Image: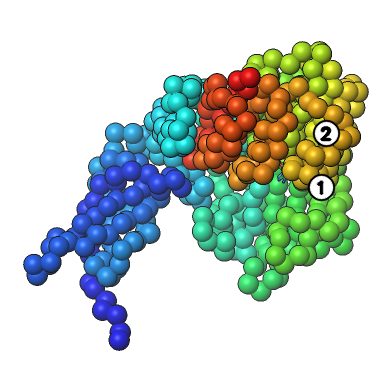
């Protein structure tokens, strides 16, 4: 039987709350029809704040339970909506809180962290007041843009990998990166270079990556393309001249060949057009070499606060052996090693461990032991090869460490554990595992690492009660 299609309705609704993706949610109840109870409709939309009154058009309104749509018109703003006069709107998405006053974003994240911890039976009093940014704009040290087949260069609209929104300006990128973007767009236009078309799989230019160290000011520009730079010598030379002429701090210009259909920033071959294949960056006074594919904390201002907090909680001294689990290129390892007798780092990505080893040498540290391994088996091997640490720090990916790793950590039995988390939900789940080993949560410090998004980091101190 064919399902009945109901009429399209235009509704004026008020946003009740935000969901975990930062989208506005309205729980709408249709007026009762022919004596029946009203039907419930959940309406979900981007770019709103609680209390906003908006007009929406919903197809088949009484025939569906959920509608994910865009609003037609903002009728009246909610109390936490900012005035839109002074901000560069990010049309592409990925910044669902961009229209919310910054103090209200912080409040929301504070409640999010508290909510997940309380749900798992932890004391809300342990959660400190979130540390925000003085200036929550242009905080990223790395941006990745995509060339569209229509000549645009920017980010794809959220949920739509084909539509590229040309980046005129950005609320997240430092001004210099915006200037690089415009210089690259002009170069593309002057040489009539095509952007890669995901459907026909044709076109030259795929991605533009920019990295800028806030500490050293060194700039890296990377072009991902489907042909080699040596096959386009005039085009590549002109790009080099333009960028090195305009940006004195250009330290690395790289052309990456990538003909892989699925993965747009994979690298088959690399050619350095200018400078080196890495830039120097610094965090808390430690030097790091950053290649184009190195994972490095994307908000350096807040990352320094994370490192400070972790070191404060750890209270490491020169008699201690310390372990950094999920260590990456050594953001927490190096400052900890500088205060410890010895430090071990475990990380699954081989190139990150190579970087961590080189970073240790570059910073004059000779008391580090870095191991490429999955966290769980790494913990086992470490005990045999290196021994027992006095302090354990972990900084797992968003999914958290998981029960097996947390139980292994519990069995290690260090007096203190410092947990750096980028996801309060998996943090709360992971902490539960430590209860059985006599650990107690001491303090949770939320830090706003990514303003305008729903992400929130926490630095947590856990101690053993025995
Ligand atoms: C949130 S990052 C932290 C990196 C580092 N602490 C930093 O601040 O740069 C998490 C790290 O865990 C690594 N990782 C992911 N799964 C892993 C696993 N099963 N075992 C070990 N490391 C893993 C990732 O490669 C990544 O470097």
Question: Whole-percent x and y of residue 240?
Answer: 81, 46
Question: Where on the picture, by quarter, is residue 388?
Answer: top right
Residue at image position (34%, 36%) is: 81
User: Does any portion of residue 417 appear in the rendered image?
Assistant: yes
Q: Quadrant of the C terminus?
A: top right
Q: Secondary structure at mark 2?
A: helix
Q: Nearer the observer, disc 1 or disc 2?
A: 2
Who is closer to the viewer here, 151 or 394?
Answer: 394
Question: Whole-percent x and y of residue 460?
Answer: 58, 26
| Sequence-first disc among 1 and 2 | 1
Q: Which mark is residue 254?
A: 1
Q: How dense is the environment of label 2, judged by Cα within 10 Å: few (below 14), some, or many (20 and up)?
A: few
For this orientation, the residue located farthest to the bottom is 1
How many discs appear? 2
- Residue wearing tag 2: 383
User: Does any portion of residue 291 appear in the rendered image?
Assistant: no
Who is closer to the viewer here, 145 or 229?
Answer: 145
Question: Whole-percent x and y of residue 93?
Answer: 49, 49
Q: Is mark 1 within 8 Å of ligand 1?
A: no
Q: Is residue 305 above or below residue 220?
A: above
Q: How dense is the environment of label 1, judged by Cα within 10 Å: few (below 14), some, or many (20 and up)?
A: many
Q: Secondary structure at mark 1?
A: strand
Residue at image position (21%, 57%) is: 29
């Amino acid at each position: 039987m064919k399902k009945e299609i109901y009429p399209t309705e235009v509704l004026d609704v008020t946003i009740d709350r935000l969901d975990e993706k930062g989208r506005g949610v309205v729980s709408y109840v249709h007026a009762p029809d022919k004596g029946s109870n009203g039907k419930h409709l959940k309406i979900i939309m981007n770019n709103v704040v609680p209390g906003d009154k908006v007009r929406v058009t919903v197809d088949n309104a009484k025939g569906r339970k959920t509608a994910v749509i865009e609003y037609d018109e903002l009728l009246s703003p909610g109390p936490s909506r900012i005035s839109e006069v002074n901000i560069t709107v990010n049309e592409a998405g990925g910044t669902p809180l961009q229209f919310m006053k910054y103090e209200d974003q912080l409040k929301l994240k504070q409640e999010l962290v508290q909510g997940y911890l309380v749900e798992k039976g932890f004391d809300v009093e342990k959660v400190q007041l979130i540390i925000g940014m003085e200036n929550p704009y242009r905080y990223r040290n790395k941006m990745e843009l995509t060339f569209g087949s229509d000549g645009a260069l920017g980010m794809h609209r959220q949920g739509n990998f084909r539509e590229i929104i040309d980046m005129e300006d950005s609320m997240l990128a430092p001004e210099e990166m915006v200037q690089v973007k415009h210089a690259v767009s002009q170069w593309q236009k002057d040489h009539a270079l095509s952007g890669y078309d995901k459907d026909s799989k044709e076109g030259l230019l795929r991605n533009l990556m920019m990295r800028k160290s806030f500490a050293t000011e060194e700039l890296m520009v990377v072009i991902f393309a489907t042909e080699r730079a040596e096959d386009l010598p005039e085009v590549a030379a002109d790009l080099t001249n333009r960028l090195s002429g305009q940006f004195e701090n250009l330290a690395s210009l790289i052309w990456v060949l990538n003909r892989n259909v699925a993965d747009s920033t994979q690298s088959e071959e690399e050619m350095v057009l200018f400078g080196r294949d890495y830039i120097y960056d610094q965090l808390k006074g430690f030097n790091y070499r950053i290649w184009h594919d190195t994972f490095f904390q994307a908000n350096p201002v807040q990352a320094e606060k994370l490192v400070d907090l972790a070191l404060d909680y750890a209270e490491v001294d020169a008699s201690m052996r310390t372990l950094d689990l999920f260590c990456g290129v050594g953001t927490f390892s190096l400052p900890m090693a500088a205060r410890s007798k010895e430090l071990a780092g475990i990380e699954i990505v081989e190139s990150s461990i190579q970087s961590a080893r080189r970073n240790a040498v570059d910073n004059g540290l000779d008391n580090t032991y870095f191991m490429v391994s999955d966290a769980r088996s790494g913990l086992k091997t470490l005990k045999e090869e290196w021994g027992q640490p006095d302090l354990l720090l972990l900084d797992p990916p968003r999914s958290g460490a998981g029960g097996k790793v947390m139980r292994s950590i519990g069995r290690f039995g260090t007096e203190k554990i410092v947990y750096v988390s980028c996801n309060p939900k998996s943090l709360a789940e992971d902490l539960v595992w430590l209860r059985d080993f006599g650990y107690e949560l001491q303090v949770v410090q939320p830090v706003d690492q990514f303003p305008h998004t729903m992400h929130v980091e926490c630095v947590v101190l856990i101690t053993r009660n025995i």
